[in-house]
Image (tube, rainbow, N blue to C red):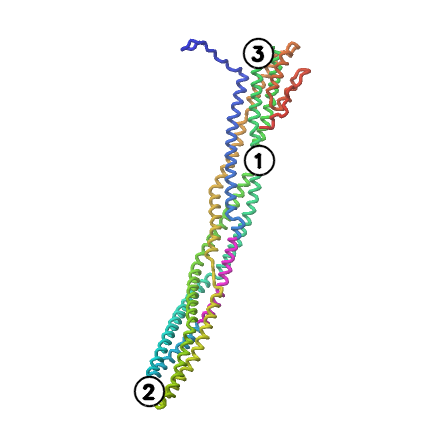
Amino acid sequence: MMSPGTRELVVASPPPPPIRYALMQIAAELDARFVRAGDALAAAIELSEQIVGGLDAVVSALDARDADAATDDLAEVAAAITALPAALTARGRRIATITDIAALLRAHVLDMHRSLRMLRAYGMNIKIAAAGEAKFVSFVEGMEDKIAAGEALLTEVIRALNALDAAVVGVQQADRRLAGDCAHAVPALPQRLLADARALGEHRSGSAQIAVRVSAIARAIQTKVLRLLHAMQIGDRTRQRLDHVVAALELLDARAYPPAARAHVERLLAAQLAQIVQDFERETGALIGNLQGLLPDVAALGALLADQAGEVDRGTLIRLDRSVSDADRIIVPLRAAQRQAEEMGRLIAATVGDLTARIDGLGAIRTDVQEIATNTRLLCRQHSDIGRAVAVVAQEVDLSASGLGTTATEVGRTIGELGSAQRLLGDDGAGIDGGARLGRALTTIRTAVTRTERLVRDGSEDARRLVALLETSAAELGSEFALGGPITQVQALLSERAEAAPVPAPADEGALRTLLPAIADLYTMASERDIHVDFLLPGMALIGHPAHDEDGLF
């Protein structure tokens, strides 16, 4: 044929003979069909991994450490709430002791205040009795300065006692509210928390068992997937063997060999094709069987999914969430009341500390009053005439000083008792640190709830898709791999054509001794050589047999 532009002669390549062309088409189809099968298998593997991953996520949300910590938190909060009423009762007794001591201290301080007022009045009487004598007037003025300092100190003590009374009232009010909340919460709340702790532990145990089963199923699926992948290699092996038959036909068509020699080779190639069909159908059957064998495993995964995300299991987690949330709402006012009590306790401690710091000052008042009494007597002796008039007043001053000294000693002792009572109040054990513990438990539970809900939503759909995919794939792969028929048709055509030819004569052996070794060089698999041996002429043997065949490499 001439090219229109160049007028050069262009020779078109002739199409391959029908048999060779048919085999080439079948080999090309193999790749496309096995790609489709591989895509379906990859999708199935991905879905199964998603399901297993979802189950693993639920199990990991309640791993042993977190679940045990949440269980311990719930149990400890329950124990603290259970112990709270008794602790509040004990604290009430200690606060009552503080109240009694504070009342006694107030009485002593008021006695000291009255004594100082009386001393101030006695000072005025001394001035009158001394008729303005300068020494007595100067003495009384110094006495009044010391009395004023003492009164100022006692006023500060009274102010501190008033603050203490207010703090005690605040603690008592807070404790009454706390006791009221406890009356509604105990014993129901701690009992429910303990039940929640047990339920969480049981749920964790069940989840751990599911994790073991998930792991076992995952391993089984992995094993079967490996078998599937190995079975998928039949496509590569079959395509190679078909390529070898096509190459042998090309050798046969390259020259005009005698009909008998040609028929002998065609019988050989027909035998190769028959074995290819047998091996292909056996191995694709195994592939489909293994694919169908995944269905029970997927069903087992679906059952686990139902167990893990079923209404009973989900209900357990949701009830735990609701119960612990309710407990958290109850503990909020308990904690608020406790914080108020703690603040009042700190105020009591500060007040007691302030009073303790003033003990030395109260002792100084006693010393000053005793000095006033002593100096009054000395002045009376030094001024006999005026002294006799003042002596009567001096005697009253001495009596007041003595009584004030006794009262000051009692005040110091009482403040010491108040300090001891306050320290005991700090050890009353009425604490409840439930907020942080319940928060940790809620976080653990809610993480499990969230992941379970996700598993219900996504995992169930994945399981349904996986079952449908495997069932559909198994049915479709049966038709996808139905290549045995076309290959058998080509094999029958070769056999039929070979049967019509004469049996090789000695004159044909030369051609066969050239063709058969050339064809043998095409082989890469032992199964091909095993068939080839049956068609060797007497005295012929396979030459250059590879040390390693490729039967198992694909």
Which badge, 3 or 2, comes first in the chain's sequence? 2
Distance of mark 2 from mark 1, alpha carbons? 122 Å
> Label 3's element?
loop
Residue 96 falls inside the magenta stretch: yes
For disc 3, the neighbor class at 10 Å (few under 14, some 14 to 19, many from 20) is few
> Label 2's element?
loop
Distance of mark 3 from mark 2, alpha carbons? 164 Å
Quarter of the view holding residue 155: bottom left
For disc 2, the neighbor class at 10 Å (few under 14, some 14 to 19, many from 20) is many
Q: Of residues 173 and 490, which is closer to you in this image?
A: 173
Q: Name the residue under label 2.
A: 130
Q: Of residues 446 and 453, which is closer to you in this image?
A: 446
Q: Which of marks 1 and 3 is in front?
A: 3
Q: Residue 358's x, y, as percent?
A: 41, 72
Q: Mark 3 points at which residue?
A: 255
The number of numbered badges drawn on the structure is 3
Q: Which of marks 2 and 1 is in front?
A: 2
Which badge, 1 or 3, comes first in the chain's sequence? 1
Please name the amino acid that badge 2 sits on.
Ala
Range drawn in magenta: 69-98
Please name the amino acid that badge 1 sits on.
Lys
Residue 507 falls inside the magenta stretch: no
Distance of mark 1 from mark 3, alpha carbons? 49 Å
Q: Is residue 534 left or right of residue 239?
A: right
Q: Which mark is residue 224?
A: 1
At a point 53% along the width and 19% down the height, the residue shown is 22
